[in-house]
Amino acid sequence: MNMKQKKPWGGRFTKQTAASVESFTESVSFDWRLCQHDIEGSIAHATMLAKCNLITEKEKVAIIKGLKEVLAEIRSGKFDFKESLEDVHMNIESALIERIGEAGKKLHTARSRNDQIALDLRLWIRDQTHIMIHLLISLQREFVKKGKMFFGLIMPGFTHLQHAQPVLLSHYLLAYVEMLERDITRLRDCLARLSKSPLGACALAGTTLPTDPKFTAKLLGFDGVCENSMDAVSDRDFCAEYTFCLSLIAMHLSRLCEEWIIWCNDEMKYIEISDAYCTGSSIMPQKKNPDVLELIRGKCGRVFGHLTSLLTLLKGLPLSYNRDMQEDKVALFDAADTVHDSLSILAELVANTKFNREQMTAACEKGFIDATALAEYLVKKGVPFRMAHEIVGKIVRECIRVQCKLSDLQLESFRAFSSVIEADVYKVLGVENCIRNYQSYGSTAPGLVKKRIAYWEKKLSKG
Ligand code: ARG
């Protein structure tokens, strides 16, 4: 670390910055991750400066070459990021000046770190979004694969964590595919809103120099330029929004994890996770624990925490740029890393999990999960639903008393509760019949589930 480093903003200062201030205010220890996007932005900015005759063509070429060399040096791990130069922007700029001299000093023409960081974050999130969408698609694929592989397997569907109605395991798995699809579209929406370039806003008010922000925006692949320079440098909505998108992903994953943690316990044994994706106990030799699932569930809290940090960071913050905003990256990066790692390991775990047919099938025999089908049978025979509900409730009570399933009752016993019940009642009882008889759109009817599997297979096979 070079404490004597001359500050790019040092002109009006008469004293050296205190070492404690340097280490308290630095951000390069974490914002170095923006280096590629920072350089991408600087290349576009230099190109614009040359087009507007604010630098010469020769200077532009030297700047771009120099920046590319700096990036290569960073990638090789040889670059010496200096805390005394505060952040990634000033580290790169001074390295450029060291390399190419005078021309490098012109790069910051008509630009401030305020619009520069607002740009870098947008570029970084844009790339991250694509990575995240890719991971979401990979996880969707795993669910669809399992859904196809286990098509026909019936399990109890739960409400209140109690046996409710039978469903196809495939239907359950596809529920997660739908959730993840919403996560993808949410990320795309977020992307559409952040796709405006803040470059040109400079510190907060714009510039008196004849620049062409629209040109820079186009070079960087944005849809346009931020309409208001003060908003452009103050806005971190997109960071909060992206972290909100990540929070919903993490929340979705946590629900699956919770279920599967329960599913692999000794009571349920619905699933068997491969040994490679479980861990043991340091004291109990017999243990095989679903730590990966528990950690994903736990890390969800961490992501929510980052969302809260960001919202709190922005609350009441006056326009325009304030140094508080430097903290946004700590939250943003960790939220993104956490969700990235969770998605990627969960896809592996799903691929390495087996569903236990016997246990799921046996579980369907418990809890009268065909009771609603019986009520609907009565409705088809003209009984108003509320009455049908009451009648079936009483029949269930009788079954509990004599300890049998609904389908074990004799026809006479049924008829004691309702004279509309006939021999065809046995065609609606039992989980197999229930599943076969579902018909509403979006239900677990096998034909519909099969179609949906085919739909997802086709959709997910692209790209
Ligand atoms: N490191 C700063 C951040 O992350 C960059 C912008 C600094 N701007 C300033 N006026 N000090 O927010």
Image (cartoon, rainbow, N blue to C red):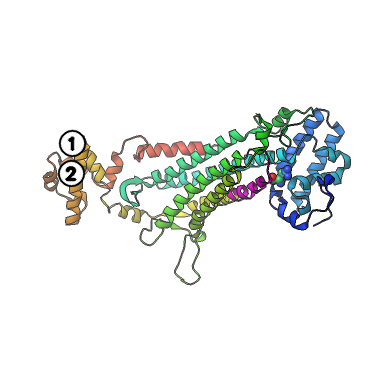
- Per the rendered image, the range of residues in magenta is 321-336
Residue 163 to residue 184: above or below: below
Left or right of 144: which side holds 36? right
The percent coordinates of residue 285 (x first, y second) are 46, 71
Is there any visible trace of residue 43 in the rendered image? yes
Q: Quadrant of residue 318?
A: top right
**Residue at position x 49%, y 36% from top?**
458
Question: Image check: 193 left or right of 51?
Answer: left
Q: Amino acid at mark 2?
A: Ile
Horizontal and vertical percent for residue 256?
Answer: 45, 50
Q: Is mark 1 within 8 Å of ligand 1?
A: no
Q: Is residue 186 above or below residue 256?
A: above
The answer to whether the residue labelled 2 contacts the one labelled 1, judged by CB atoms less than 8 Å apart, is yes
Q: Is residue 331 magenta?
A: yes
Q: Nearer the viewer, residue 85 or 413?
A: 85
Seen at 59% across and 36% down, the residue is 191
Give how far apart the Cα atoms at labels 2 and 1 are.
Answer: 10 Å
Residue 225, horizontal then vertical, whole percent: 67, 30
Q: Please tell me which residue is depicted at 69% across the width and 46% down the height of the picture.
A: 323
Whether the magenta-drawn stretch holds residue 158 is answered as no
Q: Which residue is mark 2?
A: 391
Q: Which residue is disc 1 drawn over?
A: 383
Q: Amino acid at mark 1?
A: Val
